[in-house]
Amino acid sequence: MKNIFYLFIMLFATFSYAQNTGLIVGKVMDNESGNTPLVFASMSIKGTSVASQTDLTGLFLIENLEAGDYTLVCSFPGYETQEIKVHVDALQPTELQVSLAASTISLSELASLATPTVRQQEDETLTVLK
């Protein structure tokens, strides 16, 4: 009887500490160059600090998520950021395949971004010289 009691306590402890968490697994591809993998693309859950990066094959894994709906943010420098709504189930992984398109920026936009910085440096230089 004593052994059955200990067995019951051990089983109860095991089940009480078991976690039912879900995960998101997927691959991030480059839409512009024939679906080649994007290396070190950033994947994050919007509104949380949970984040991951893709590996050398474009694969990512985000673990230990409670079951529910999330917004996954995928970003990579030079590409348009994409937000994807996903549903995470604790019993099976959520699989995704994301294709990012290259973002376009005109030279005039680039020049307008750099111009205030150059003027500010010139003003600081004149102030020092006076």
Image (spheres, rainbow, N blue to C red):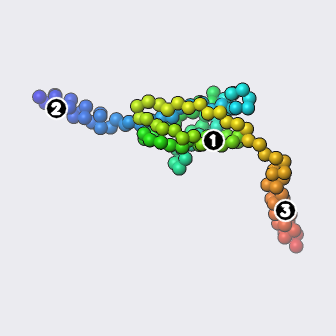
Q: Residue 79: which quarter of the image? A: top right
Q: Position of residue 63 (x, y in %)?
A: 48, 36
Label 3 amino acid?
Answer: Arg
Left or right side of 97 for 119: right
Cα–Cα gap, marks 1 and 2: 54 Å
- Residue under numbered circle 1: 82
Query: Under tag 1, what secondary structure?
Result: strand
* Residue at the spot 48% in from the left edge and 38% down from the top edge: 87
| Disc nearest the viewer among 3 and 2 | 3
Residue contact at pointers 3 and 1, CB within 8 angstroms: no
* Residue at the spot 25% in from the left edge and 35% down from the top edge: 12
Query: Under tag 3, what secondary structure?
Result: helix
- Residue under numbered circle 3: 119
Q: Earlier in the sequence, mark 1 or mark 2?
A: 2
Mark 1 Cα-neighbour bin, 10 Å: few <14, some 14–19, many ≥20: some
* Residue at the spot 54% in from the left edge and 43% down from the top edge: 71
Q: Earlier in the sequence, mark 3 or mark 1?
A: 1
Q: Position of residue 75 (x, y in %)?
A: 64, 41
Image mark for residue 96: none
Image mark for residue 5: 2
* Residue at the spot 82% in from the left edge and 55% down from the top edge: 112
| Disc nearest the viewer among 3 and 1 | 1
Query: Under tag 2, what secondary structure?
Result: helix
Above/below status of 113 relative to 69: below
Mark 3 Cα-neighbour bin, 10 Å: few <14, some 14–19, many ≥20: few
